[in-house]
Image: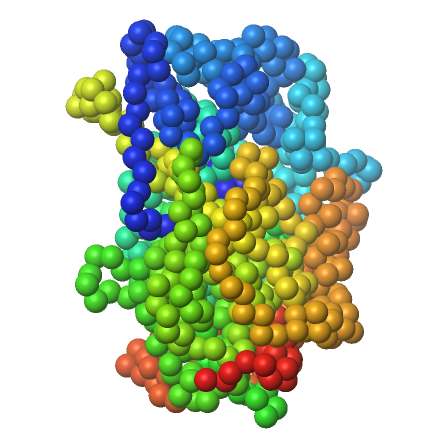
Amino acid sequence: MFSKKSLPIILLLILGGGIFYAVQSSGNTNNPRTKYEKILRSVGEMLEEGHYSPKKIDDDFSKVIFKKFVAQLDGDKIYFLQSDMDALKKYETKIDDEIHGKELESFYAINEVYNKRLNDAEAIYKAILTQPFEFTSNEEVSLEGDKLPFAKNETELKEVWRKRLKYMTLDRYVDLLEQQEKNKGKEGYVEKSNADLEKEAREKVGKVMEKTFNRLRNQFTEEERFNAMVNEVATTMDPHTTFFPPKEKRAFDESMSGRFYGIGASLKEEDGQIKIATIVTGAPAWKSGAIQVGDAVTKVAQGNEEPQDLTGYAVEDAVKLIRGKKGTEVKLTIKKSDGVTKVVSIIRDEIVLEETFARSAIINSGDKKIGYIYLPEFYADWERPNGARSSQDVAKEVVKLKQQNVDGITIDLRNNGGGSLYDVIQMAGLFVKDGPIVQVKGRDEKAQVLPDRDKSVLYEGPLTVMVNEFSASASEIFAAAMQDYGRAVIVGSSSTYGKGTVQRNISLNGDKLGDLLASNNADLGALKLTLQKFYRINGGATQLKGVESDVVLPDQYEYLKLREKDDADALPWDEIQKADYSPVHDFNLPAIKSASEQRVSSNSAFKLIKENAKWLADENDRVYSLQIDKFRDERKRVQATYKQLESLLKQGNNLDVNFLPGEEDRFKDDQAKTERNKQWLKNLQNDLQLSETVNVIRDLISQGNMAKN
C-alpha cells in the first residue's frame, strides 16, 4: 500500500474549498483494450492534469519507472541476469508511450522473464540446500542489492544464492546453538550435535524459501505485479501519491474508521519483509514499548506454540496470524533496523480510542510546576456532532493545567503524524492572537492564508513543543507557527519529518469507459493524488526541510534515513511570499540554546546516544561475515550497543511526574486501562528528552518575560 520510503502514518488533512480535477482525454484516440491499459492511462492522465507539480512523462521518466519496477521485482539481484537486463533494455523508453496510449508491452515482457527466472531460482536454492554448510572459512556476503551488480551468468547467480542461503542458515544455526547453551543441563533436555543443529537450521531455511516461492507464485500474481508497476508510476511523482488497487483501497478506508482489533499495528510489505507500518497509540503493541514503526516481524507464535516464520508471507496472511481473540497471547519476533532481534509478548485486546486522545500531567521540578500535554495525533470525529476534537481537548487540558497554577507548559508532538488541518489551526489559536497560521497553495493557484480568527488567547505563559523525526504534516504546521511567532521553543531531533503536501483519493472509475469496466466487475481502484502544498507563514515550505528544532537533542534515529528528504522522489523545498503577521519574541532564544547545549554536551547519556546511534546506522551498510566466530562477535556487539542505547533513553533522572487531581482514577472501572495509564506515567518519569525539555522550560521561566496566566 505504501511505497518503500513513504511515511507509514496515514495523514487525514481536512481542507475547506477543495480542488477537483476532472480527467479528460489526452487526445489519443486509441481506446485501451484491457483493464491494465485503462488503469495505466487513467493514472497517467490524473498525474499530468491534477498533480501539484507533475514531472514530465517522457523517456527519462520511463527509464526511472523501468529501474524501480525491476527493483520491486528483484531488489536483491537474485533472479535476473545481466543478459536479461540487456534484452529488456529496449523497453526502458516505452513505458511513457504506453502511459500515453500505446499498446502495453513492457510489463508483459518483464513479467515473462521474471516468471522464468523464478523457476530457475527455485531449482538453484533447492539444490544448494541439499548439502551442509561449513562455517569456518573466511567468507563474507553483502545483502544490499542496490549496491550489487546483476549476475553475469548462471554460475555467478548460483554463487550469490549460495552465500545468501549460507548466511540465512548461519543466522538460524547460531540461534539454535544459543538456545542449546541456555538449556544445557536442564532436566529432560536432549543435546544435539553441531551437525544436527546445522541440518535443522538448513531445513528451517528450506521452509522459509518454500513459503517465499509459493507466495511469489500464488499471491504476488501477475495482477499484483502490474499494480506494483503502476504504483511506481504514481510514487515517482512524489512519495505520497499512491495507486490503490480495489483491495488496498478498501483496507485504506477501513483504517480511517479508527477501530482496530488485535495488537494495534498495521503492517506493510517491504523488501520481502513484513514490517510495522503504523502503531495505534494505547494499543497492545504501543504499550509493549518494544515495537516501533519500521520494525520487521519475522516470526509469529500463538502463546507457547512453535513460532511460524513470516519470510515470504503476504501482509494479509501475516495479519491473520497476529489477530486473535481478546486476552490471548501472541509472540512476535521483531528485527530492528540495526539488526537486533527480540521476542515481544503481547496480549491481544480491543484498541481503545480514548487512549489516543490528548491528556496531561504535572511535572514538579524544584520550585517549579510544569504542565505536560501529550497529543498523539490531530484527531477529529466528523461523524458525530459531539465527537472528540483534538483542539477542543487540548484546550480543556490547558484549562486544567492553569487551574493547577503551572509555571509553564510543554506540548509533546513526538511521533504525531498529523491529522485535521482545521484542528491544528484552532489549536495554534489557543496560544496566539488572531492571525495567519499556515498557507496552502494548489497547482497554478495563489496561496491561501488560513488564519485563526479568535482574538482571545487561552495561554500566554512559557511554552515548549517537543518533536522528532516522525512529527509530520499537521504537527509541523503547529510547530512552525509557534516558531514563526516566537511563541514557543521547539525541542527535539534536528528536524521533523518534512511532509508538506496534501493528498486526496480520486476513483479511477470516473469516466464512461471506467464506469463500463467497473460495471463488468473490473473495479479500477483509486489514486491518492498530491494536490496542494503547505507553507509556513514566514513563506518557507514545511516540505522536505520540515521544522528545525531550536534546541536539538540527540536521539537514536538521527542517522537513519527515515525523513522525507531521504526519498529521491520527494518534492523540493521552496518558498512563497510571507504572510502578514507580528512575531511575539518574548524570550532570549540564543541564551536558552546555549544553556541546553552545555547541559547536553556534559551529559554522558546524550553523548553515548549520539555515538551509538551513528555506529548502529553505519552497521546497516556493512558486509556480514560467514565465519561463525566473527559472525557471533559482530552480533553480540550490535546487541550490546542496542541494549545500552535502550537503557540510556530511559535515564530521565526519575522525573517527578504526577497525574492531575482525579485523573489517576480516570479508568477505575477498567483495570487494564488503569495499568496502561500508570505505565504511560512511568514512561514519562524515565524520559531523557522530556527531562532536558523541563530544563529548557525552566530557563524560559527564569527569563520572566512571559505572563504566567
The percent position of residue 347, horizontal first and vertical second, equals 40, 64
Q: Residue at 61% across / 57% down in the picture? A: 548
Tell me if I can see residue 231 in this picture: no
Instruction: Please state, as top left, top right, bottom left or bottom right, where the N terminus lies in the image.
Output: top left
Q: Quadrant of residue 63?
A: top right
Describe residue 418's horizontal placement relative to residue 518 as left or right: right
The percent position of residue 424, horizontal first and vertical second, equals 40, 60
Please name the colour scheme applied to the rendered image: rainbow
Q: Residue at 38% across / 83% down in the picture? A: 400
Tell me if I can see residue 631 in this picture: yes
The percent position of residue 165, horizontal first and vertical second, equals 64, 34
Q: From what the image shows, is residue 238 above or below residue 319?
A: above
Seen from this angle, which residue lies furthest bottom?
367
In the foreground, 130 or 607: 607
Q: How many marks?
A: 0
Describe residue 298's horizontal placement relative to residue 651 as left or right: left
Q: Residue at 73% across / 71% down in the picture? A: 594
Seen from this angle, which residue lies furthest left?
519
The percent position of residue 662, horizontal first and vertical second, equals 35, 88
In the foreground, 330 or 412: 412
Q: From what the image shows, is residue 290 above or below residue 68?
A: below
Describe residue 326's horizontal placement relative to residue 703 as left or right: left
Q: From what the image shows, is residue 539 above or below residue 225?
A: below
Q: Residue at 59% across / 81% down in the picture? A: 705
In the foreground, 463 or 281: 463
Q: Quadrant of residue 227?
A: top left
